[in-house]
């Protein structure tokens, strides 16, 4: 999207309009500071304000982040830029570390997206007002600031976690930007959490957020031993917990909703601090925290039949996948069987092949294993599940493909190209590829039209039987957010099932 005109931005600033939070940042000439539109400070004069479409653009123009409204806590919108899917994909790759560390380049990033480096820069400038490198650097320093504010990590740990090679380099960057050393912005606190408490961060989203629908979707699909959902006695305040494996290190993460703050609280126990950004990126992806949900809901409401469903579940998100390989395995296990049968198979796979979680801080009753890696399954002589041979072969082919290409489940080219790449793997058909694209690669226009749950939801929507072909035609007007329409169809279908108290039988894919 292009930035709204200055008068509209200024009105948003004057009214502290939360709908602009994360989409527009205001830089104040007289103070050299940039703010969120919801900053509680007195509104600056019109002539002193310049508006930017990203924090990176304001920083590139020489402004420092406000210490009061903390631009690093603005909802980060990855998937709203529907006008440029390439920019969305690039942002997803950058948050996965595509520009962090040695040997990473904008060239390689552009190549993965199927465009030239100059074209990528141009798109970034047009949509974000900043270069890809500036976006990556801004993310790093803002993430560090977030950690300084919200945790008691040492500055060395913060520097490492935010991807700086040395404390000295981190101090330099910080001093340049804030005109003070990192330690100076930390609030004094007398309480020191115990070493076992882990690291807790808040990650903001744009309201509304239909947390209950998100949790019940995940709950039906939890992998025994790897994930669990807890609620209090009144069946409220649900919390999602799971085990985490990254580059051989293991830990846990817990996520709960803080609706009064339009945030989720994320508690991480993990032995390697520089994995923190990757873990937070996964939480953002799984819980779809980057959605510009109002725009999406508005767009889907243009369909007169879908509108009442959107009104029934405002803020319904499209759940992502924690890990591409895990999600793809689950998709294969789910071919031709019910959701609960797929869940059971996944639990057996974990018990047979997953690594046991060692006892350490963050261990939680019920979380016993990490999900098996692609390498492990590719080498396993036998997978040992009661499944048709064809599906077993598909599982092995998938494991081999994923262990050869660690980026298999990251954005690649266009949606069609990503689907084609996945379909090269024996045993991955149209439905599975679309499902993986939707949940793991986060292609928000992916749409597994042959899904039985979707077809049933669509039949209910139109009061007439749907086929994959009619549904695809029907879905044209839902672009570029067909994934969210799919979520509404699934949700409506799931409610039907629980209302009638009928157990799910074969053919339920997602
Ligand atoms: Zn401010």
Image (tube, rainbow, N blue to C red):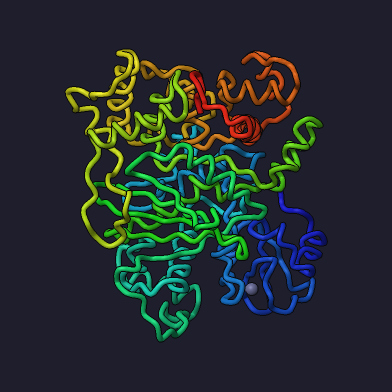
Place residue 449 in its image quadrant. top right
Query: Compared to 130, does 407 lie above or below?
Result: above
- Residue drawn at (27%, 59%) of the image: 271
User: Is 380 left or right of 82, judged from the image as shown?
Assistant: left
Query: Compared to 23, does 343 lie above or below?
Result: above
User: Is 221 left or right of 467, judged from the image as shown?
Assistant: left
- Residue drawn at (58%, 35%) of the image: 444
User: Is 192 left or right of 430, judged from the image as shown?
Assistant: left
- Residue drawn at (38%, 55%) of the image: 253
What x and y, as percent, mark residue 463?
Answer: 75, 20
- Residue drawn at (34%, 44%) of the image: 226
* View quadrant of ligand 1: bottom right
What x and y, as percent, mark residue 485?
Answer: 66, 33
Nearest the viewer among 453 and 400 is: 453
Nearest the viewer among 413 and 376 is: 376
Query: How many numbered marks are there?
Result: 0
Tell me if I can see residue 435 in this picture.
Answer: yes
User: Is 181 left or right of 510, judged from the image as shown?
Assistant: left
Tell me if I can see residue 55 in this picture.
Answer: no
What x and y, as percent, mark residue 50?
Answer: 71, 66
Query: Compared to 112, does 128 lie above or below?
Result: below
Place residue 20 in its image quadrant. bottom right
What x and y, as percent, mark residue 274?
Answer: 32, 58
Nearest the viewer among 393 and 106 is: 393
């Amino acid at each position: 999207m292009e930035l709204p005109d200055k008068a509209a931005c200024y009105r948003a600033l004057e009214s502290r309009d939360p709908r602009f939070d994360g989409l527009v940042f205001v830089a104040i000439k007289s103070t050299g500071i940039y703010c969120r539109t919801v900053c509680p400070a007195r509104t600056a004069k019109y002539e002193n304000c310049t508006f930017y479409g990203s924090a990176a653009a304001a920083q590139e123009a020489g402004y420092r982040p406000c210490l009061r409204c903390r631009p690093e806590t603005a909802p980060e919108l990855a998937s709203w830029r529907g006008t440029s899917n390439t920019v969305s994909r690039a942002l997803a790759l950058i948050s996965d570390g595509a520009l962090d560390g040695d040997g990473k380049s904008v060239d390689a990033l552009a190549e993965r997206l199927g465009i030239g480096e100059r074209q990528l820069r141009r798109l970034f400038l047009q949509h974000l007002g900043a270069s890809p490198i500036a976006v990556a650097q801004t993310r790093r320093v803002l993430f560090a600031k977030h950690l300084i504010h919200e945790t008691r990590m040492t500055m060395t740990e913060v520097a490492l976690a935010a991807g700086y090679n040395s404390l000295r380099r981190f101090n330099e960057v910080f001093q340049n930007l804030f005109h003070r050393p990192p330690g100076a912005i930390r609030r004094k606190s007398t309480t020191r959490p115990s070493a076992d408490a882990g690291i807790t961060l808040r990650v903001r989203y744009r309201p509304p957020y239909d947390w209950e629908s998100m949790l019940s979707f995940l709950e039906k699909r939890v992998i025994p031993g790897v994930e669990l959902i807890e609620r209090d006695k009144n069946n409220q305040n649900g919390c999602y917990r799971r085990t985490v494996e990254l580059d051989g290190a293991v830990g846990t993460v817990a996520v709960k909703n803080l609706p009064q703050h339009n945030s989720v609280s994320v508690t991480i126990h993990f032995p390697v601090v520089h994995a923190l950004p990757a873990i937070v990126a996964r939480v953002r992806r799984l819980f779809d925290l980057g959605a510009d949900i109002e725009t999406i809901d508005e767009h889907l409401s243009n369909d007169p039949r879908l509108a009442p469903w959107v009104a029934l579940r405002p803020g319904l998100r499209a759940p992502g996948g924690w890990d591409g390989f895990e999600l793809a395995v689950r998709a294969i296990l789910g071919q031709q069987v019910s959701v609960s049968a797929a869940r059971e198979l996944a639990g057996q796979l974990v018990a047979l092949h997953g690594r046991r979680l060692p006892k350490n801080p963050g261990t939680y009753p019920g979380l016993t294993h990490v999900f098996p890696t692609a390498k492990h399954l590719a080498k396993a002589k036998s997978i040992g599940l009661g499944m048709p041979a064809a599906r077993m072969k598909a599982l092995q082919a998938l494991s081999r493909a994923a262990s050869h290409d660690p980026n298999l489940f990251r954005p690649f080219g266009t949606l069609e190209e990503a689907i084609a790449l996945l379909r090269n793997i024996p045993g991955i058909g149209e439905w599975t590829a679309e499902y993986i694209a939707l949940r793991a690669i986060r292609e928000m226009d992916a749409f597994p039209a042959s899904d039985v749950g979707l077809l049933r939801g669509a039949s209910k929507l139109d009061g007439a039987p749907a086929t994959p072909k009619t549904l695809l035609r029907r879905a044209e007007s839902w672009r570029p957010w067909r994934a969210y329409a799919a979520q509404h169809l699934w949700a409506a279908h799931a409610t039907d099932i629980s209302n009638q108290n009928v157990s799910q039988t074969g053919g339920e894919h997602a």
